[in-house]
Amino acid sequence: MNSKVTFGAIFIGMTLASATAAEPKDIWQKTCAKCHGADGKGGTKIGKVLGIKDFTDVQYQSSLKDDTMLKAIKDGIKDGDKTKMKPAEGLSDDEMKSLVTYVRAFRK
């Protein structure tokens, strides 16, 4: 009987954990696509103004380091006093790492 209770508690905990962690595509759409575009090409109005790079470009992807992308997601990007990218607030470390993986999938 005790093992059934333990299994039930584990199952409920796993269900709650998966329900609270957002999918990378959903995070991208909510947090990143406005500037980077749904396709990662940076072809949005804002992306063009800011000169956002194309994440589908193999050479550009090769120049990116995972830790640099994580830092940009977490801290944002500034050029002097000018904010080029705001930090993605409210994301867990795992969600930020999943975004890096999601960006890597844009490479063609």
Image (cartoon, helix red, strand yellow):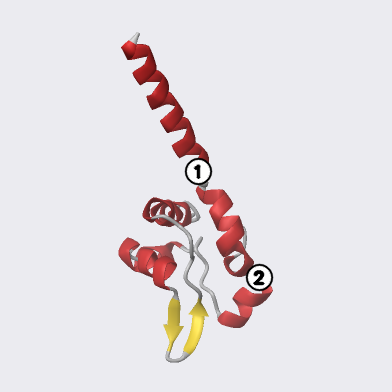
Mark 1 vs mark 2: in front: 1
Residue depicted at 34% across the width and 20% down the height = 6
Q: Can residue 40 be seen in this snapshot?
A: no
Residue 32: which quarter of the image? bottom right
Residue depicted at 37% across the width and 55% down the height = 93
* Total count of labels: 2
Residue 90 location (% of width, % of height): 48, 60
Q: Earlier in the sequence, mark 1 or mark 2?
A: 1
Residue 80, placed above or below residue 29: below
**Three-letter code for the amino acid on which mark 1 is drawn:** Thr
Q: Which residue is mark 1?
A: 20
Residue 10: which quarter of the image? top left
- Other residues around mark 2 within 10 Å, as few (<14) / some (14–19) / many (≥20): some
Q: Secondary structure at mark 1?
A: helix
Residue 23 location (% of width, % of height): 52, 46
Q: Nearer the viewer, residue 83 or 12?
A: 12
Q: Can residue 8 be seen in this snapshot?
A: yes
Q: Residue 102 — which label?
A: none
Q: Residue 44 — which label?
A: 2
Residue depicted at 60% across the width and 62% down the height = 33
Question: Is 42 left or right of 83, judged from the image as shown?
Answer: right
